[in-house]
Structures are given as C-alpha cells and as structure tokens.
Image: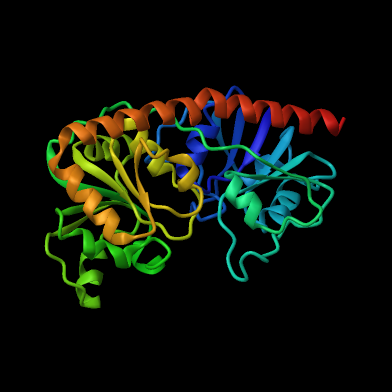
Amino acid sequence: MNVLLWHVHGSWTTSFVHGRHRYLVPVTPGRGPYGLGRARTYPWPDNAVEVTPQELAGTDVDLVILQRPEELELAEQWLGRRPGRDVPAIYVEHNTPKGDVPNTRHPMADRDDLLLTHVTHFNELFWDNGGTRSTVVEHGIVPPAVEWTGELDRLAVVTNEPVRRWRVTGTDLLPRFTAVAPLDVFGMGVAGLPAALTARGAPVLHPVTGYDDLPQDRMHQEMARRRAYLHLCRWTSLGLSLIEAMSIGMPVVALATTEAVDAVPADAGVLSTRVDTLVEAARWLATDREAAYRLGARGRDVAKERFGLERFLADWDRLMEEETCASR
C-alpha cells in the first residue's frame, strides 16, 4: 500500500515504517511540525519517502494514518480527498487523556468514518471514545543493537521536555534519586534540566547531566553502560524508552502508573507508587549487580515476546488490510 502519515513521534514512526509498504511522509520547506519529513536521528528504511503537499495531490494513497485532529483538514487539502470518505483512515492516539479524566472525550469520538487505534489498553479505557470504533495495537520496537553492561555507577533517564512538562514527566522526583548516584538524562529539551533543578531549590546530592537529542543508536549505547533505568512519568502513555531499556537488558525502576503496571512484570523490574521504595530499589540495583542482571534479563525476554517488531507490524498489516478492504 501507499500509506500517508506524518512524522510525529520518532520512535513509534521508526517501528511503523519498517513494514512492507510505501510510507509517504510529508515534508515542507521549513520542516515544521506538519512537514518534518524523514527522521534524522532514527534509522529509517528507504520505503519511507518524503513527499511535498504539491506532490500528494497527484499521488495514489491507499490509506491515511492520522495522529492529530488538524491532520484531517490538512489531508483533505493536500490530497483533494476526504480521509474516511474518499480514502480509508485510521486515527492513532498516542497519549493519555488530559483534562477531566476519566471523562475526557476524544476529539475523534462519535465518528463513523475512521477507526480509532490506541497504543495501550490503558489509553483506550480512559479516553471517552464515544461511538467511534476503537481498537489497540500495542507498541513494537526495532531491537536495540546493544546489551546492558552497567559498568557505570550512574542511573539513566529518557524523557522529552522535562522542564516544561515537570510533574507529568516526574522531573520533580529526580533530586531524590541523586542520593543514590549521578543521573544521566537523555532526550529532547534536557539541556536546561540541571539549572532548572537547582533553581527549584531541591537538594541535588549527585550531578544531573543532560544529553540532548542524541541519535537513537548512540543513546542506546550510552544507556546500556548505566547501572539501571529510571522511569518516573506520572501520566503518560507507555514510553517506548522503557521498552527499549528492557530490550537492552537494563534493570528498570518505574512508577506504577498507567500502562507500566501491565508492561513490566514483578520479576522484570521494581514498580511502586511509593517513591521511597523506588529510591531504595535503585540503591539495591546499584550495589547488587547479580540482581540487576537477573531483572534485566527477564525484562529483555518480556520485551522481546510482547513488544517485538514482527508482532507489531503483523498487527498493523491485519488492521490496515481490514480497513482498506472494508472501503472497497
């Protein structure tokens, strides 16, 4: 198929474009949010091709993957066809609901022209989808090319925009873990994090270092050298970085919130809503390498079985085929 989708979430899109289709990724001169084109920090195969809005008008498109409400109008303008009416459409919801949870209505609620697809069962449960058909396709990841070594007595965190999002990403909790070891924080918008933590006045006992927007393969290499992985998001969809850390074989310490509770079995990591429990778990894993290896090895097995790329792409193939066949 020719599948139109915007580059919104780098990790998810990287997995998605590893399928067997031709993926049309809009690109605009300024490479803004609706025209990023191909990823520059993630390895994408050649079947993901950049197309301009002008080119789309004369391009055969079998399916549109929507990820933001405004893409409905954009797709109609650029294709000259209405998603869901003139060309099949699937709307992918990546995020937990905001606002009046659990009564937040999804922007695609009560539509009969598309399929609403969530990336976690938690999200499908908590969004009010109305009468719109909905389903879940769980995450799948391209397997990282490294394995955990943990030779550095440091803790790894992956997060995006931790200063702006603060409590959502659990940024306010980071100083408590500096009592255990230095923290290395990877992701977008992390360069200003150490200064922001200092400005908030919380005691930072070991250094916090930000590594801003590293290429994915290099980030994985750096993560694998750290002793354990911290996942402190309070209210977010299941982070692909958590799955990647498990796939590397890292022992994980995570808040027992949203889908993480279901994704990380008790023998594959330490989950709790008690921050003191997580701090002590990080201290335990920092000193007991055998236990760290045991948890990480189990996490790697879980991630491979549940979040493998082949399963993810097979699920999406079935879904896309069903939607395109139903519209014929």
Is 41 placed left or right of 174 in the picture?
A: right
Q: Position of residue 252 (x, y in %)?
A: 31, 43
From where the camera sits, is residue 98 visible? yes
Is 110 placed left or right of 39 in the picture?
A: right
Which image quarter holds the N terminus? Answer: top right
The extreme right residue here reads 328
Residue placed at 72% from the left, 36% from the top?
A: 63
Q: Position of residue 227 (x, y in %)?
A: 19, 41
Is 3 placed left or right of 246 in the picture?
A: right
From where the camera sits, is residue 38 visible? no
Residue placed at 43% from the left, 26% from the top?
A: 304
Q: Is residue 229 above or below residue 312?
A: below
Which image quarter holds the C terminus? Answer: top right
Q: Position of residue 323 (x, y in %)?
A: 77, 33
Q: How many marks?
A: 0
Q: Is residue 262 above or below residue 296?
A: below
Q: Is residue 224 above or below residue 191?
A: above
Nearer-the-camera pick, 199 or 304: 304
Residue placed at 72% from the left, 53% from the top?
A: 72
Nearer-the-camera pick, 107 or 48: 107
Tell me how the rendering is colored: rainbow
Nearer-the-camera pick, 239 or 283: 283
Nearer-the-camera pick, 295 or 163: 295
Report which quarter residue 161 is drawn in: bottom left
Report which quarter residue 54 is drawn in: top right
Q: Position of residue 300 (x, y in %)?
A: 36, 29
Residue placed at 74% from the left, 27% from the top?
A: 321
Report which quarter residue 204 is drawn in: bottom left
